[in-house]
Image: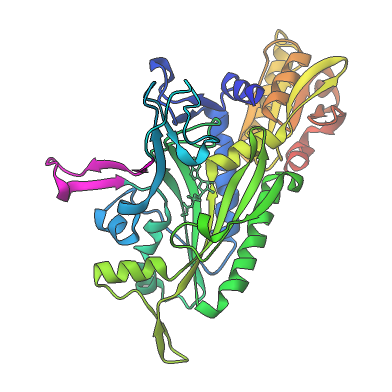
Amino acid sequence: MEKIISLAKRRGFIYSGSEIYGGLAGTWDYGPLGVALKNNIRDLWWKRFVEDREDMYGVDAAILMNQKVWQATGHASGFSDPLVECSGCKKRFRADQLDDRAKCPECGGKLGEERQFNMMFTTHVGATQDESTISYLRPETAQGMFVNYKNIIDSFHPKLPFGMAQIGKAFRNEIAPRDFTFRAREFEQMEIEYFIAPKDWAETFEHFRNEMHAFIKDVGIGADNVHELEVPEADRAFYSKRTIDIEYDFPFGRKELYGLAYRTDYDLSRHAEHSKIKLDYLDEAAKERFVPHCIEPSFGLDRTVLAALCDAYSEDEMNGEKRELMQLDPKIAPVKAAVFPLLKNKPELVGRAREIYRDLKKEIPNIMWDDNGNIGKRYRRQDEIGTPYCVTVDFDTLEDGTVTVRDRDSGKQERVATEKLIRYINK
Ligand code: GAP
């Protein structure tokens, strides 16, 4: 894990939040390559779950919501983790993550009584600060969809089953943020609330279970490292009748990557009761009104980025030299190809390489230019960030119009005609 964290920082994937001020625990800043990787994953998700389907409605709801939303769902009173404080060093811990609930893991001191700690960040909206102006940074994107259920029904008149999808930030004041970006206080979720007739819940659950695995495969994360955990009733969120956690073998252990939950009609019913607005569905054929039930596949975007990095990281030897390698799937690789002139002090090579670089960049996003150091060093640098292809422009290019294309994983080199380069890389 240390090697991955160090590479992520050194090469501009992920930095500590507010680093020059000593950081802010549980916050992370994505650098240029991290943003590109995250955007690629986000786009894959949106394409699969929204654009390629006819039954999904995308939304982008406000992060700040009326406090009544969180009172209705029970988050204001119940979205908490068990907290214990050491009577000696005063450090605080999540009680359910301790092996020994009586003894401080830091100083060996006595731990106090367990109490519930609400994880929502509170803020105030407007210039006055009293009970009525309280708002929260949303702890899940899900509620932005439930509160817009009626808007989607009124504007699009969808027939059941249909879903709403959203990608956005969520915030939790985690007691113990840890394991790099795995448990952060600010993170991004990609969530679907899929509305169904109650009788269809089991079939829909299976559908999304398969779709979640298909997405993981699409991202290029190896199935061998992915597992399922049937969450027992005692550990399920208060709203769920069935939950499966999809877990990944991170270097720090097997941990939750995504969750799939059958939320029943809990959220819509609670919002209907608290807002006094009807949130039901008219089945015209059966002349019957009912509150739809809901299946919720929930994906952490930052955890996907982390799992993709962990899965892709490897070390090997090439031409007698050790190398660090990110075997990212080309679909999500932040840089698709890098273009080099063989020598940077030969204007004719640099000029032709620049032209090829510009032509590629017009057609394929995220093409990189590199003319620093020797070719071997450039290859190592691109291997580290997962660039699938390196394109070298040399003297033969000026003669016969071909370039050397070098494959990241095998190191194999091939001469490719310049006019076929875009098709070659796209393929
Ligand atoms: N709407 C349901 C929900 O929020 P969750 O299991 O609490 O369920 C869903 O969160 C997903 O969000 C998790 O599977 C994980 O990928 C991501 N997630 C949750 N807490 C996180 C945290 N503190 N840091 C990073 N990602 C987190």
Quick check: is 122 in the magenta stretch? yes
Q: Is residue 267 left or right of residue 263?
A: left
Say which of 85 and 193 sits in front: 85
Residue 345 lies in what quarter of the image? top right
Q: Is residue 84 left or right of residue 397?
A: left
How did the renderer colour the structure?
rainbow
Which residue of the protein is positioned furthest toward the top in this rendering? 345
The answer to whether residue 18 is seen in the rendering is yes
Q: How many marks?
A: 0
The answer to whether residue 66 is seen in the rendering is no
Residue 53 lies in what quarter of the image? bottom right
Which residue of the protein is positioned furthest toward the left in this rendering? 128
Residue 293 in the image, given as x and y percentages of width and height: 47, 72
Q: Quadrant of the C terminus?
A: top right
Q: Residue at x 66, y 44 (%)?
A: 248
Which portion, as a residue range, is magenta? 114-136
Q: Quadrant of the N terminus?
A: top right
Q: Residue at x 64, y 67 (%)?
A: 206
Residue 72 in the image, given as x and y percentages of width and height: 30, 61
Residue 220 in the image, given as x and y percentages of width and height: 71, 44
Quick check: is 287 in the magenta stretch? no
Q: Is residue 145 left or right of residue 32?
A: left
Residue 303 in the image, given as x and y percentages of width and height: 57, 41
